[in-house]
Amino acid sequence: MELTNKQITVIFKALCDENRVQIFRLLQGGERCACELLDEMQLSQPTLSHHMKILCDSGLVVGRKEGKWMHYSISVEGADVAIKCISELTAVTETEGKCCCGE
Amino acid sequence: MELTNKQITVIFKALCDENRVQIFRLLQGGERCACELLDEMQLSQPTLSHHMKILCDSGLVVGRKEGKWMHYSISVEGADVAIKCISELTAVTETEGKCCCGE
DNA sequence: CTATAATATAGAAAATCATCAATATGAGGT
DNA sequence: ACCTCATATTGATGATTTTCTATATTATAG
C-alpha cells in the first residue's frame, strides 16, 4: 500500500462523476467494448474515451485491446486496493478525547 | 442501500482532494476540533470550513458542536456505507463474454 | 449588553473538469 | 495502397471546484 494523498485522489476520482458511476453499473454485467458503452450512455465518443481514461488511471477498470476494439472491465484487484485504501483511511487508531479545546 | 449515482459521487468526492485526504489522516488519531485541523493544514479558515462541509456531506465525517467549537471525527457508519457502495459497484455479476464486437 | 473568539457564509478570482467538434491514429478489409 | 471503422487526441468552451478576503453568525466571558 502506502499510497500518497495524490494517488488516493486518482483512485476515487473514478467515482466522482455520475456518468462514470453509470459506466460501473454497465460493466457489472461483464466486459464491454467501448462501442457498447457509447450506445448506452448519452455521451459523445471523445467524452466517453476521456472517462474511460480516468477509470483506467484509477486502476478500478482495465482495458484490453483486440483489433480495433477496446474492451473494458472492472478490475477486482483495483477494487481491492480501493477498499483497502478507504478502510485504512477511515480506521480510527485512537478514540481517546484529547482535544485542545475546553472539554 | 440503493443509492443514486449522484449520491455516490457525493460520498467519494470526500476523497478526491489531497487536502481532504490529509484531513482523514489527522482524524485517524481521534476526534479533532477545527482549530487543531487548521493549525496542521496549510489552509485559510474559510477553506478548511468548506472542506469540512464536503466531508460531512459525504457521511464519512461527523461534526459535533460544543460551545464555540466544532469537533470532527470519522464516521464508522459512513465508512461502512462507502465500502459497501464500492464493493457493490465493482462486483461483477456476470463474467461471460457477450460483447457485440467480433471476438 | 458589549467584546472577543470560533466557525460559517458570501462573493470573486484562479484552477480544474466535462464536454463537444474536428482531427489524428491505428487496425482490418478490398 | 486505399478506404473504412473504432478509438484516441487536440483545442475550445462552459461548468464546477478550490481558494482567498471580507463579513456574518453564534457562543462565551466580563
Image: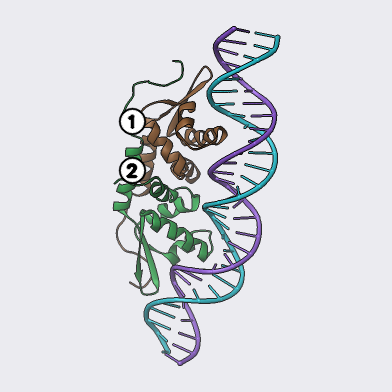
Chain colours: A green, B brown, C cyan, D purple
Q: Earlier in the sequence, mark 1 or mark 2?
A: 2
Q: Which residue is mark 2?
A: A85
- How many residues crowd around disc 2 within 10 Å: few (fewer than 14), some, or many (20 or more)? some
Label 1: which secondary element? loop
Q: Amino acid at mark 2?
A: Cys
Q: Is residue B64 left or right of residue A98?
A: right
Q: Quadrant of the N terminus of chain B?
A: top left
Figure quadrant of residue A65? bottom left
Instruction: Give how far across and how far down residue A32 sits, in percent.
Output: 38, 62
Q: Amino acid at mark 1?
A: Val
Any mark on residue A92, and which? 1
Instruction: Give how far across and how far down residue D25 sits, in percent.
Output: 64, 23
Q: What residue is rendered at 39% in x and 47% in y?
A: A8
In-front residue for pair A40/D29: D29
Q: Is residue B3 left or right of residue D16?
A: left
Label 2: which secondary element? helix
**Looking at the image, residue A6 lies above or below residue A45:** above
